[in-house]
Image (cartoon, grey):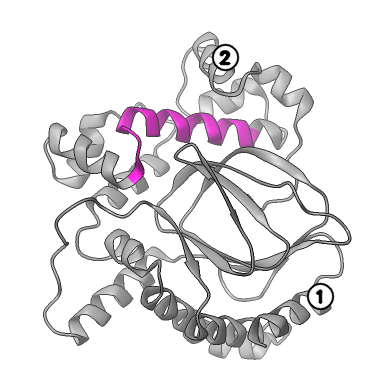
Amino acid sequence: MGKQRIRQIIDERLGEEGLLESGIRGVQLFRVTEPVRCAPAVYEPSVIAIVGGAKEAIWDGTSHVYDSSRYLVCSMSMPVEAGTPLASPDNPLLGVQISLDTKVMTELVIETESAAGAIRTPKAGPLPQGIALARWDDAFTDALLRLVQLVGDPLGASVLGDGRLREVYYALLGGEAGESARRAFGVGNEIARSIEYLSRHLEEAVTIDDMAAQAGMSRAVFHRRFKEATTMSPIQFAKSMRLNSAAMNIAGGMSVSEAAAGVGYVSSSQFSREFKRAYGESPRQWSNHRQLVGALR
């Protein structure tokens, strides 16, 4: 019932393809009616909840299709490939995208763990990956519905929006993706901090030593912990972040030289070689053949 009501609200508020700002910071409704092949993207910390159709994301070399049975939580910036290969006018992709506020999430994780007793130290063993899929449960569904019901009510969104967004965050932490989010935003979030640092400095020559310093680890320990969290080495991850960001910018109309410089490449020939090795096309071929379809990735 809750998911159906969310879908009705999206249908009422967003009759055509596109993104709709909800009036609540970081919350958007979306409708996609055309199929889009998976293309390089960077997922920022966010929740994507689908109530109609299906979306595909590829990470760790594996395709993950998620729909109204599972929502996606990205707790760290991650390079992926994403698309909507099954979308059509008769079967549109409908859903809600919520940016996760790092400050609020961190405060909430610490508050919930403090309320339960002493703040827990990170568990031993591999870190959860930065992207997780979780089955909808009643707590998440109810919280998301209460949030979406504020769309179209500017006064309600202004007065109640932050509180209801916090309810969604709380429900997320109690769901199947909660452990991944707690490790990214709470105690033991060193890897997430290093990724955030990289994301803010893509145009600079950030080294592995720089990232390890942000995490407060030796290079060797950082390399091991980073690969546990992301399944990639720090060097592979940084390159994927830069190339995916450049590919998105080129598809959005930015010139190849601007896109290369914007992610820290000094040599345009090196950028072109690495780009073609990653995507099978030169940056100029990519520019001619791709279009950025909406802001949703």
Q: Amino acid at mark 2?
A: Ser
Measured in 3D between alpha carbons, the distance from the residue under mark 2 to the one under mark 1, in whole angstroms, is 42 Å
Q: Residue at x 83, y 56 (%)?
A: 33
Membership of 231 in magenta stretch: yes
Would you place residue 68 above or below residue 193 in this image? below
Q: Residue at x 29, y 74 (%)?
A: 109
Residue 80 horizontal/vertical position (percent): 52, 41
Q: Residue at x 68, y 58 (%)?
A: 54
Number of other residues with Cα within 10 Å of mark 2, as a class: few under 14, some 14 to 19, many 20 or more: some
From which residue to which does the magenta span run? Answer: 230-249
Number of other residues with Cα within 10 Å of mark 1, as a class: few under 14, some 14 to 19, many 20 or more: some
Viewer-closest of 95 and 101: 95
Q: Upstream in the sequence, badge 2 or badge 1?
A: 1
Secondary structure at numbered mark 1:
helix
Q: Which mark is residue 272?
A: 2
Q: Amino acid at mark 1?
A: Asp
Secondary structure at numbered mark 2:
helix
Residue 43 horizontal/vertical position (percent): 51, 49
Does the rendering let one see residue 204?
no
Query: Considering the image in quadrants, where does the N terminus appear?
Result: bottom right
Q: Which mark is residue 11?
A: 1
